[in-house]
Image: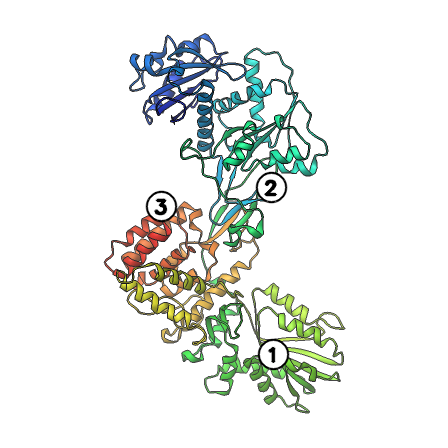
């Protein structure tokens, strides 16, 4: 219904004592439906108490019938409002009317001036401020982003919030309430310029008010411009007798720029809503209609100032991987992203994956080539999320533990692509590349034994007829190879062949591009053959891995808890930190990739694995192998185009999440942990979807109930994902789950969840 604007506030500024006030604002000239007014008042006061004072505001142009509703018929009007009686009316009710310039005068009832310590003008300004702020809040004028994105203003500032005045101007009574605050400013205006068309309704409302007052005035044009674009697009100043209405500002800088650029004079500019520092407000007070800013002493109903960042490089939100969304056009518009859920299927795995894993199964942990959180060189570039130990793979060629299928494949490639007239075998400066170079030398019937040369001694290579084999144990980005290819262009008599054991890149497209660049020569593309034994697409991430975040989180945890009161948790965390800190000594993580169960046992694969087309043996299905598999599957889906049916790519308007159903479908704890660790932060933004958040909460609670059996074995990993803020739920769901943990008698679970309640909620 809402034909009238009703609101309440506390006045501790203007009255002789602090009192609560209800305001009923009427904008109609005629309103024959008295019953509707009675119903609306009844509805409002069913959820609100009658306050110390009641202020009724009518337009001076209202009909005698409306004025009677609040004069001789006032008891009938308020008959359904508890507490409204003759005494209340005589002592606490005031009926005022506003005039054509927005001035207020008493109609009937108690004169509020008798209770004031300030002026009547100040009283109504404070009332108007509260009313406009109430409208702004109720209509969602302050748009807040979700954790995964933030906004870029037309001024290029970044923030997690922005003011959208278009949201505010919805209801006619509320629009008129704001409009009367501008009446006096419109007296001599010949034209109006609004910085967004969404506020054009405001000057039209003012013209309607003037018409209702019977004023004789010519219709004047109302134009729109894009606030900050005016500085680039407008070459001349606004007409001197025009008004420039700015929808909102957080600094007042736009006023200064308009004046500095000589586009407008100060008395031409109006800012509807301001939310910023007091110093800035005082500089521009005469231009601001409503100051939304909270003041703990004088305006507690206001809004806290929100932080803005001048650009991308200085934006703390961008550094937390929040996606910047530009707010542009003359209508500030952001669309709630569509949430799509992706459930993993067998078809999501690349075709090579299962045969690749089958070839490289290891009977002993020391022979396993799949590792996490490791890098074989000492530098500041960080550990790889997934590491394939090509050196170990090639070392095994000399032993009986070598993969027979891999060795056969390698030998076929060598026999097919390595020329007998090779002059040089140039190997990269890592152990695996040197082993592979020697293996090639020992397994090819060369006419003359080629010379083995390290890439560091490339100057020893002579430009002569024949072939040079560039040997590498693996490739990730191709940076070193591309550098070498430029050097070898000077050796135009040599035919270059690149022979790479494991060609691992982030995507097939990236792999094809890398091969194309390496093969370029005097004959164009494919001048130099690129031979790879194994082609793999997997995560290229190094640094800022899940284990880095885990380590930082656990180090912070152990520094904050009282170890005497949290002995179980302290012991659990210290043992885990020792593993993470010794990752270089152990050459990465293999069967300690994940947190142990609460009973201290390791997570393991219990049965068949949908992404492996071979029999699974629990003893040799190492955690790092399972993790590599899931990581590769997710990477494969992520590489699908944004417009494909199955993708995990994100856009401003589409959020592709890993469905909570995945954790029901894949109920082995080791697979659940792999999904949690291998997925990107944005894949688990369940706080974007009420349904997804509720599903996750339900699943997590069932895991708490079964923390001591197979169903809840991955619970420590889920709690860690919450602690590192990777797994996100709606706040009420997260709170419900963490509080639910406290009901379990297990001390480690209790202490762990209690810490999360402290730091997360």
Q: Is residue 356 left or right of residue 489?
A: left
Secondary element at tag 1: loop
Which residue bears the numbered disc 1? 428
In this picture, is 233 found above or below 747? above
Between the C-alphas of marks 3 and 2, the distance is 35 Å
Q: Residue 565 appears at what percent x and percent y?
A: 26, 60
Q: Are marks 3 and 2 in contact (CB under 8 Å)?
A: no
- In the picture of the structure, the residue carrying the numbered disc 2 is 155
Q: Earlier along the polypeptide chain: callout 3 or callout 2? A: 2
Percent of width and height locating residue 752: 31, 58
Instruction: Tell me the tag on residue 732.
Output: 3
User: Could you tell whether 719 is left or right of 130 in the image?
Assistant: left
**Disc 1: CA contacts within 10 A as few (<14), some (14-19) or many (>=20):** many
Q: How many numbered marks have been drawn onto this rendered protein structure? A: 3
- Spot occupied by residue 640 in the image (x, y as percentages of width and height): 55, 58
Looking at the image, which residue is at 42% across and 50% down? Answer: 686
């Amino acid at each position: 219904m809402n034909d009238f604007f009703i609101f309440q506030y506390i006045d501790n500024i203007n009255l002789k004592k602090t009192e609560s006030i209800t305001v009923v604002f009427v904008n109609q000239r005629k309103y024959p439906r008295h019953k509707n007014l009675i119903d609306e008042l009844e509805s409002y006061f069913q959820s609100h108490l009658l306050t110390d004072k009641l202020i009724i505001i009518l337009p001076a142009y209202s009909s005698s019938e409306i004025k009677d509703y609040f004069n001789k018929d006032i008891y009938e009007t308020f008959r359904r409002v508890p507490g409204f009686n003759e005494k209340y009316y005589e002592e606490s009710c005031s009926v005022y009317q506003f005039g054509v310039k927005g001035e207020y005068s008493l109609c009937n009832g108690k004169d509020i001036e008798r209770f004031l310590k300030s002026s009547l003008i100040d009283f109504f300004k404070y009332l108007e401020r509260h009313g406009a702020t109430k409208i702004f809040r109720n209509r969602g004028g302050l748009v807040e982003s979700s954790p995964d994105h933030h906004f870029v203003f037309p001024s290029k500032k970044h923030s997690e919030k922005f003011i959208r005045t278009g949201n505010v101007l919805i209801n006619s009574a509320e629009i008129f309430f704001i409009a009367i605050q501008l009446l006096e400013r419109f007296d001599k205006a010949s034209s109006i310029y609004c910085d967004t068309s969404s506020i054009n309704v405001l000057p039209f409302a003012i013209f309607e008010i003037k018409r209702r007052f019977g004023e004789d005035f010519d219709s004047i044009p109302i134009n729109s411009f894009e606030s900050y674009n005016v500085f680039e697009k407008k070459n001349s100043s606004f007409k001197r007798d025009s008004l420039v209405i700015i929808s909102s500002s957080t600094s007042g800088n736009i006023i200064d720029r308009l004046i500095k650029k000589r586009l407008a004079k100060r008395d031409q500019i109006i800012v509807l809503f301001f939310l910023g520092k007091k110093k800035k407000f005082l500089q521009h007070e005469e231009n601001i209609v409503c100051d939304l800013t909270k003041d703990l002493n004088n305006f507690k109903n206001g809004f806290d100032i929100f932080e803005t960042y001048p650009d991308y490089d200085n934006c703390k939100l961008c550094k937390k991987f929040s996606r910047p969304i530009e707010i542009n056009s003359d209508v500030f518009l952001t669309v709630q992203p569509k949430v799509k859920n992706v459930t993993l299927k067998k078809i999501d795995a690349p075709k090579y994956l299962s045969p690749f894993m089958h070839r490289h199964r290891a009977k002993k942990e020391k022979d396993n080539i799949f590792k996490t959180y490791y890098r074989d060189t000492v530098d500041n570039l960080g550990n790889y999320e997934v590491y394939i130990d090509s050196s170990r793979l090639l070392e095994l060629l000399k032993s009986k533990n070598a993969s027979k299928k891999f060795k056969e494949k390698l030998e076929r490639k060598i026999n097919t692509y390595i020329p007998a007239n090779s002059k040089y075998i140039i190997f990269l400066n890592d152990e695996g590349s040197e082993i592979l170079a020697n293996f090639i030398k020992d397994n090819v019937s060369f006419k003359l034994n080629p010379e083995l040369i390290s890439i560091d001694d490339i100057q020893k290579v002579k430009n002569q007829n024949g072939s040079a084999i560039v040997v590498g144990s693996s490739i990730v980005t191709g940076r070193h190879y591309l550098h070498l290819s430029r050097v070898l262009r000077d050796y135009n008599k040599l035919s270059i062949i690149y022979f790479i054991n494991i060609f691992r890149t982030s995507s097939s497209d990236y792999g094809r591009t890398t091969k194309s660049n390496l093969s370029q020569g005097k004959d164009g593309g494919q001048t130099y053959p690129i031979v790879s034994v194994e082609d793999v697409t997997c995560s290229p991430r190094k640094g800022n891995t899940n284990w880095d975040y885990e380590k930082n989180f656990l180090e912070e945890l152990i520094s904050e808890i009282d170890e005497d009161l949290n002995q179980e948790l302290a012991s659990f965390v210290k043992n885990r930190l020792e593993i993470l800190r010794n990752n270089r000594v152990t050459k990465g993580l293999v069967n300690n990739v994940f947190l142990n169960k609460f009973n201290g046992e390791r997570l393991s694969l219990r049965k068949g694995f949908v992404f492996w087309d071979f029999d699974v043996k629990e003893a040799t299905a190492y955690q790092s192998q399972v993790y590599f598999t899931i990581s590769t599957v997710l990477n494969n889906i992520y590489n699908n185009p944004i417009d494909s049916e199955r993708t995990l790519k994100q856009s401003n308007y589409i959020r592709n999440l890993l469905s909570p159903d995945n954790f029901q479908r894949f109920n082995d704890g080791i697979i659940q942990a792999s999904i949690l660790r291998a997925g990107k932060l944005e894949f688990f933004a369940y706080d974007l979807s009420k349904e997804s958040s509720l599903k996750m909460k339900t699943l997590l609670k069932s895991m708490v109930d079964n923390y001591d059996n197979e169903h809840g074995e991955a619970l420590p990993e889920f709690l860690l994902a919450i602690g590192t803020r990777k797994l996100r739920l709606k706040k009420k769901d997260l709170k419900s789950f963490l509080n639910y943990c406290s009901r379990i008698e297990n001390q480690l679970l209790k202490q762990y969840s209690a810490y999360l309640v402290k730091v997360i909620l």
